[in-house]
Amino acid sequence: MQGVSASRRAESARTMSLPSDTLPSDSLVVRSLRAVWHPCTQMKHHEETPLLPIARGAGAWLYDADGRRYLDGISSWWVNLFGHANPAINAALVDQLATLEHAMLAGCTHEPAVALAERLSARTGGALGHAFFASDGASAVEIALKMSFHFWRNAGRAGKREFVCVRHGYHGETLGALGVTDVALFRDAYGPLLRQAHCVASPDARQAMPGETAADVAARALSDVAALFEQRGASIAAIIVEPLVQCAAGMAMHDPAYLNGLRTLCDRHDVHLIADEIAVGFGRTGSFFAHEQAGIRPDFLCLSKGISGGYLPLSVVLSRGAIHDAFHDDDVARGFLHSHSYTGNPLACRAALATLDLFDEHDVLAANRVRFDALATALDSLAERSDVAHPRRCGGILAFDAVVDDARAAGSFARRYARHALALGALLRPIGRTVYLMPPYVLDEEEIAMLASATIAALDRTLAEQIER
Ligand SMILES: *Cc1c(COP(=O)(O)O)cnc(C)c1O
């Protein structure tokens, strides 16, 4: 058997073109390309763009196998909050490891899950609770959609079974979550498998016409929602939205008035408001939760990514008491029977508790205001450039769009920019022509200056590059 798999491996290594002329065949990168199917990646692109072999992390930095370091300007896909290998979170996890690694959450319970549920609910002023745990953001979205549908069924309104999403919105890659996602690149190949959702106009402030404010754009987008609800409200279960920043759309930002308007329309037409704060929760937008800036509460709140400080997969759906009550019955089938094996994993919950401790012990939001004001100031010069459009910021999320007229150059902008940024010591991954920074909450003055200058230098180098035709 061993002989067979060895010869298969030799064969697949031959048919795949690996950068083996530059790297020894036992290097981590070559082994990875052979053994691992990397996410969100056209694997063939790694023939040109090498993988980055990460050996360790410390603070805002990731270190490669040769000891070179890269500033993690995007918090490792928006998950890290307080730096890599954070001593406080590490200590909490070591303690938890010696106590309880996992126990099932059906029929059993444990302190980390209960304490986390209590503290997250308290963070909503008690308006939301009944924490339903899962592991990934997409699972939290699935849970919120199923709960909303099932709530209306239990309430005798089974006709409410349609969902509404926002143009260019992103809610994850599983089939249900992809059904309410409007990013063509992720969605198109799977179109025939997806349940259709209504898609309403985006409130993206970049759409402002001359003389219009972001609030005007929000009002226009709301009139689209109002028209849909007038027509089909009786069939609609819920609308799902990313409050303040549609991150995967390319950091598309909107006025908080959009969320106020949605709350009013949802109340008027008995439609659930699902806030997907998987990316924008835990301080990213400047407030602890993004929806707070509109002074509203959603009916469902989906959280993940930063929840565990970027340590372990964990997600949660919080909901209003009235929603939980509609499932509370002698009849098993009226209950919410959804589950995942690792639901409420104690290690992940403990990492989340340690993360909340850091928010409680330090005025993180105030410190971040100073930190990200400084980063924005260091990027001030971008606003004057004709090759930069829409410089924008929401709390600790900073973005701008590169102006690239040539279609070929535009198509490869993100990959080329990422390569230049790495050479300058910064891990950045533009979305299309949108360059963004979403760093962890630990940057000091020197790191801020370094990140800003790498951001600008990488832009200069990418735009100056000649594209072969
Ligand atoms: C990342 C993300 C998700 C999906 O989370 P995963 O953990 O990657 O499944 C859902 N919604 C939003 C807004 C996200 O940014």
Image (cartoon, rainbow, N blue to C red):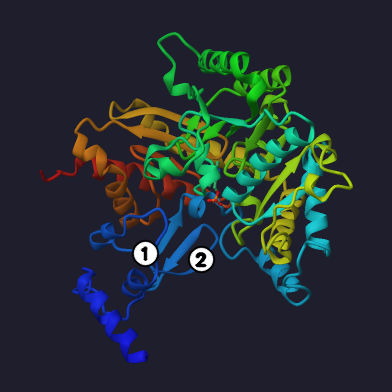
Inter-mark Cα distance, 1 to 2: 13 Å
- Identify the residue shown where x is 76% and y is 52%: 361
Secondary structure found at label 1: loop
Residue extending furthest toward the right: 330
Vertical placement of residue 93 versus 113, above or below: below
Find out whether the residues at labels 1 and 2 contact each other: C-beta distance under 8 Å. no
Amino acid, disc 1 = Leu
Residue 137's x, y, as percent? 59, 49
First in sequence, mark 1 or 2: give its number. Answer: 1
From the viewer's side, name the closer residue of 172 and 258.
Answer: 172
Give the residue at the far top of this rendering. Answer: 211
Q: Between residues 391 and 198, which one lies in front from this camera angle?
A: 198
The residue carrying mark 2 is 57
Q: Quadrant of residue 43?
A: bottom left
* Label 1 Cα neighbours within 10 Å, binned few <14 / some 14-19 / many ≥20: some
Residue type beneath disc 2:
Gly
Q: Left or right: where does residue 20 sit relative to residue 321?
A: left
Seen from the viewer's position, the closer of residues 460 and 240 is: 240
Which image quadrant is residue 395 in? top right
